Amino acid sequence: MELGLTIPLRRHLKMNSLPHGETPDRGACWDLHVITLRGRKSLLAVHCRSRYAFVLFGLSGAEWEALPATFLEGLRRSLGAAGVEPETAGEYLRRAGDIRLTRTHGRREVAFLNRAWEDVTALDHALDPARREQPLLDREVNAKPSRCAGYDGTGPARQRLARSLR
């Protein structure tokens, strides 16, 4: 699995340059970005094929330092909250393989990440400042019809992710 880190996220983590992604299957690729929500640094993760997105609100320094593990835990919880069976999520993670940190996965993917970010900020009312995981915000963002790099036309990201996990 490739995690493409945006330049602002690499700066936040004080990371030097990363390699370009090599996985041709965008189903195993996520782009990650640091965003500020209600004054707290938060993680926005966007699936490159489906534009499914989830937010981890107000991460601690230790959580940022352990970004791959933090991401995986957040992904599992987000998928569970979205109704994905644990066996399906586990099979997806097995097929996706070990995590590699890379640069983001292309202009289109970053453009759709930016659209997801706009949706997150527009749906700020759904943010629960007492929780790291944001199931209500994630559900609302992923229910909106949107475009993505991996499918033609518009549709809810949650439905496209379900197709990608099969």
Image (tube, rainbow, N blue to C red):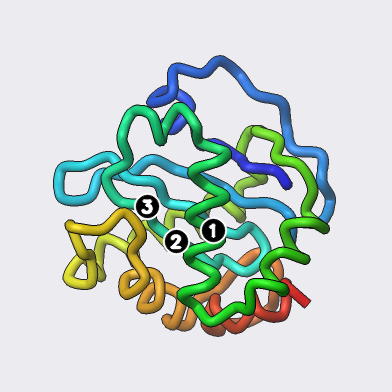
| Element at label 2 | strand
Residue at screen point 36% across, 59% down: 133
Q: How crowded is mark 2: few (under 14 residues within 10 Å), some or many (20 or more)?
A: many
First along the sequence among labels 2 and 1: 2
Q: Residue furthest front?
A: 87
Q: Work out whether residue 138 or residue 18 is closer to the camera in this orientation and state it.
A: 138
Label 3, label 1: how far apart the Cα atoms are: 9 Å
Q: Residue at x 60, y 59 (%)?
A: 47
Q: Is residue 126 left or right of residue 33?
A: left
Instruction: Find residue 113 and report its horizontal and vertical position in percent.
Output: 49, 55
Q: Which amino acid does label 3 sit on?
A: Leu
Question: CA–CA distance between discs 3 and 2?
Answer: 7 Å
* Front residue of 59 and 119: 59
Q: Residues within 10 Å of mark 3 (few under 14, many from 20)?
A: many
Which mark is on residue 54?
2
Amino acid type for the residue under numbered disc 1:
Leu
Q: Mark 1 points at which residue?
A: 75
Q: Position of residue 143 (x, y in %)?
A: 44, 82
How far across and down, in percent of the image, does residue 119 sit?
34, 67
**Whole-percent x, y for residue 56 in the image:** 37, 52
Report the quarter where the C terminus lies: bottom right
Q: Give yes or no for contact between labels 3 and 1 (Cβ–Cβ under 8 Å).
A: no
The amino acid type found where label 2 is placed reads Phe
Q: What residue do we see at 32% from left, 45% from top? A: 42
Distance from the alpha carbon under mark 2 to that under mark 1: 8 Å
Judged left or right of residue 105, residue 46 is: left
2 and 1 marks in contact (CB < 8 Å): yes
Circle 3: element type: strand
Residue 50, above or below 99: below
Give the number of the disc on residue 56.
3
Q: In this view, does 101 lie to the left or right of 97?
A: left
Residues under numbered marks 3 and 2 in contact, where contact means CB atoms less than 8 Å apart = yes
